Image: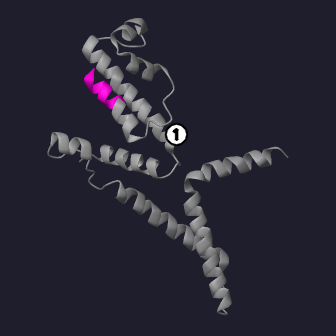
Amino acid sequence: MSSQPRFTRSVVAALRPWRRRVVAIVIVWAVIALFTGLIGLRPDVPRLAVVLVTTGALIWFAVDHIASQQLVVWPLTDTELSAGNRGNDYHVMGLATRLEGANARPEGRAELVHHLHTRLSEIIRERLFAKHGIVIEEEPRWAEGVMPRELWDFLVTLPPPDLYRPDRLDQILRRIEQW
């Protein structure tokens, strides 16, 4: 009996990022079924649901992947440094799209924060090795001694939940660049 609520909770948690899309499909499905029923047609409700889900999935797949291929202009860096084609990298464009999405809606923020923390930690570790030849796992005390306190704290603590925000991200990126 207790497995049913757990299953339901796990399904709800899995669909949380897709909540708006699922609700949109259900609403469109209900409106079409109701409209066709009102005008005297006998709608094939299950087939209509399959067509809507398939069409919605294809459209959202295309929208999600085409949106990540747009050229991204980073106003702060592009205007300050005036580099020719900064931001013309698919990884950068994908990250910019995810950051913009995280600011717009809460779904997926935790995963984005984890991804950002992991990537920034890798950059800090690479910089530590390049500057001082220290691998943090082998010599943690030496690493702590040569690293700026803010970067050390960033490495050894949980990521701040607002890491996706531009001002917070800019703060840590500037500190990495200054080091």
How dense is the environment of label 1, judged by Cα within 10 Å: few (below 14), some, or many (20 and up)? some
Please name whichever residue, 107 or 10, is drawn nearer the observer in this view of the structure. 107
Q: Is residue 49 above or below residue 124?
A: below
State the image coordinates of residue 151 (x, y, percent, origin top left): 38, 21
Quarter where residue 125 is shown = top left
Q: Would residue 94 be found to the left or right of residue 45 on screen?
A: left
One can see residue 42 in this view: no
Quarter where residue 152 is shown = top left
Q: Is residue 98 above or below residue 161?
A: below
State the image coordinates of residue 105 (x, y, percent, origin top left): 50, 52
The residue at the point 33 percent across, 10 percent down is: 146
Tell me where the magenta segment starts and ends, as one range.
Answer: 172-179
Three-letter amino acid code of the residue under disc 1: Ala
Q: Would residue 163 be found to the left or right of residue 148 on screen?
A: right
The residue at the point 60 percent across, 80 percent down is: 32
Q: Is residue 18 above or below residue 74?
A: below
Q: Which residue is mark 1?
A: 110
